[in-house]
Image (spheres, helix red, strand yellow):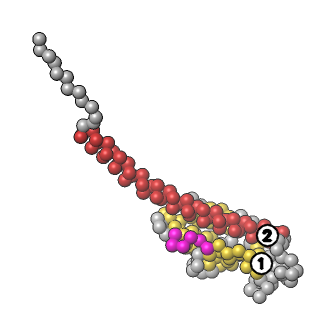
Amino acid sequence: MLAYISKKTSGFSLIEVLIVVSIMGILGVVTVPNYIQFGEDKKLDQAASRVTDSFNLVATRARTGENATPATCADYAGYEVTINPASSALVERICCDADCSGAQSVTTNQYVLPVNTISIAQPSTPTAVRFATLTGLPTSQPMILLKNNVVNRCLQLTVNKQGAVSREAISDCP
């Protein structure tokens, strides 16, 4: 009687391993750039939220006259947000005179966008937006374009006549 010798095979063949590694490589090439862009878009979204919060806070403070006591401000004239594209900063101030430039005007907060990542593409020059006392309405309606310099993506913010900030979807920069 002939004895059958059974050959036990276990494990994967070289071809199977190569196919799996190839599929994982293709998935990595496709997903990693999208994951990086997602993270950078989130940074842009966070910066836009911070800018929106700044405008909303200043409008509320202008309506209520918060922090504008006679001790800090003899002639309260509202609040102002200055957008400075050169330093990628927002500066919030209590206006203690008609043009918000007097020595009594007080800086209440300054927010600088993340360096080398997010910048202010528009406006191209420093722009001040004053919020009137009691109404909290802005004196101008600027369009602010935030740019993520890492992935060249932009997000547009617009301040309307009521002081509300609206945002567009994140897109590739022009």
Q: Amino acid at mark 1?
A: Ile
Q: Position of residue 148 (x, y in %)?
A: 52, 67
At 86% from the left and 77% from the top, the residue drawn is 69
- Mark 2 and 1 residues: CB-CB less than 8 Å, in contact? yes
Observer able to see residue 170: no
Q: Residues within 10 Å of mark 1 (few under 14, many from 20)?
A: many
Dot 1 corresponds to which residue?
94
Q: Position of residue 138 (x, y in %)?
A: 74, 72
In 3D space, how far apart are the residues under numbered discs 2 and 1 (Cα atoms)? 9 Å
> Which residue is outermost to the left?
1
Q: Amino acid at mark 2?
A: Arg
> Which region shows up in magenta?
112-117
Dot 2 corresponds to which residue?
61
Q: Is residue 19 magenta?
A: no
At 16% from the left and 18% from the top, the residue drawn is 4
Q: Position of residue 109 (x, y in %)?
A: 71, 74
